[in-house]
Amino acid sequence: MSKVDEAKRILEALGLPKKQQNVPSALALLALCNLKEEDEWSKAKAVSMSVVGNKENAKYKGIIRFIAEHYNAHYAENSRETFRRYTLHQFVQAGIAIRNPENPGLPTNSKYNHYGLSPEALEVVKSYNSRNWNKKIKQFSENTGSLREKYNKQRAFSKIPLKLKDGTELSFSPGKHNQVQISVIEAFAPRFAPGADLLYVGDTANKTLYIDANGWEELGILIGEHSKLPDVVLYDKNKKWLFLIEAVTSHGPFSPKRIMEMENMFQNCQASKIFITAFPDFKEFKKHSADIAWETEVWLSELPDHMIHYNGDKFFGPK
C-alpha cells in the first residue's frame, strides 16, 4: 500500500469526513508529518508549514511545494485557498492540526500563517501499523472534544476584546487592521461622533462581527449578507449624520470609485453621509494620499485629537 493510501486510512480512523479522505488531504497530512514515501510512520514529526511556502521566511516550508517535490503531485499556487477551505480547516476542527502553533497571535490574513500537527494527532500517526495503533486511536477519539475546546481557548486568548457602551462584548481577531477599527470605536467616536451608535463593524475573520439590525431598519436600509459595507458605520440620531469609515492598513481608502459605490448603496438613506478614511499613522496615510477622494475626511489613530479635511472651505460634516 502506498503512503498516500495509508494516509487516507489514518484520516478515516481519525474521524475525518469522506470528503477529506482524499488524495489532497492525504498529501497534506504527509507534508505536516514531514514524511516521504520511503519513511516509516514512526519517524513522523510535526513540522510547521504554510500552504505554499514563504520566500521571506524559509522556516515555514510550503505544503504544496513539499508534495510536489516528494510525491510528484503538482498543485498550482492559486489552489492554496482550496487546501485551506477543504483540508486544513477540517484538520483544525478535528484537532489534527493547529493553526499558527508558533505564533497564535498572527492576524487572519498574515502571510506568515502556518499549520502544525497537534501533539495528540502526531502520537496516533507514529503508532500506525504498530500494536499501539488501536489504543492511540481510541484515546484520540475520546479526547477530540476536549482537544477542540483546548485549541479554541488558545485562539480565544489571542483575540482583542472590545466592550461597547451598551455592554455588548466583541472579540476581534489579532491584526493591525482590526486594531485601527477598535481605535475608531474607542478613540474617534467619543471625540468626533459623541453619542453616535455603532451600526456595523466587521472583522478580518468575521465580516459580520456586529450588525445593529434595528438601527439599519430605522434608517430604512436593507443590509444583506454580501453588502459591501465600509469597515465601521456609526449613526448620530440627533444630527442625522451617518459616519461611513474605512480602516486602511494596506488598501481601500475612500477613493472616488468607492464613494460612488457608497452613494449607490445609500441612495435611499435620508441621513447625511460623512466619509472617513482611518489610518494607523502618517506613514500609511502617505502611501494612499493621492487616492483619497475630495469631500472626505482622514483620521489617524496615532493622532486621535486631529483630522485632515479634504473638504475645501468646509470643515467636518456631511457633503
Image (cartoon, grey):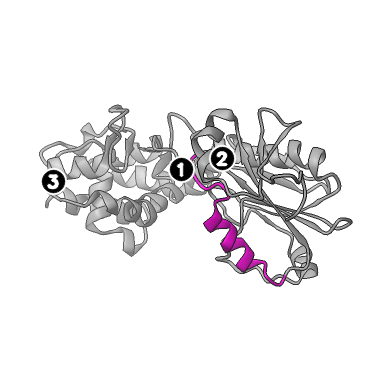
Give the amino acid type for the residue marked by disc 3 in the picture: Tyr
Q: Nearer the viewer, mark 1 or mark 3?
A: 1
Give the amino acid type for the residue marked by disc 2 in the picture: His
Determine whether 235 is above or below 286 in the image. below
What's the CA distance linking mark 1 and mark 2? 10 Å
Q: Nearer the viewer, residue 267 or 152?
A: 267
Residue drawn where x is 56% and y is 42% of the image:
248
Q: Nearer the viewer, mark 3 or mark 2?
A: 2
| Magenta-span inclusion, residue 261 | yes
What label does residue 259 carry, if any? none
| Secondary structure type for disc 1 | loop
What label does residue 109 carry, if any? 1
Residue identified by numbered label 3? 71
* Residue range corresponding to the magenta coloring: 250-268
What is the x, y in percent for residue 158?
58, 34
Q: Which numbered disc flags the more N-terminal residue, 3 or 2?
A: 3
296 on left or right of 284: right
Determine whether 51 is above or below 222 in the image. above
What is the x, y in percent for residue 278?
63, 41
199 on left or right of 109: right
Q: Nearer the viewer, mark 1 or mark 2?
A: 2
How busy is the neighbourhood of tag 1: few (under 14 within 10 Å), some, or many (20 plus)? few
Q: Residue 18, can we see it? A: yes
| Secondary structure type for disc 3 | helix
Q: Which numbered disc flags the more N-terminal residue, 1 or 3?
A: 3
| Secondary structure type for disc 2 | helix
What label does residue 177 carry, if any? 2
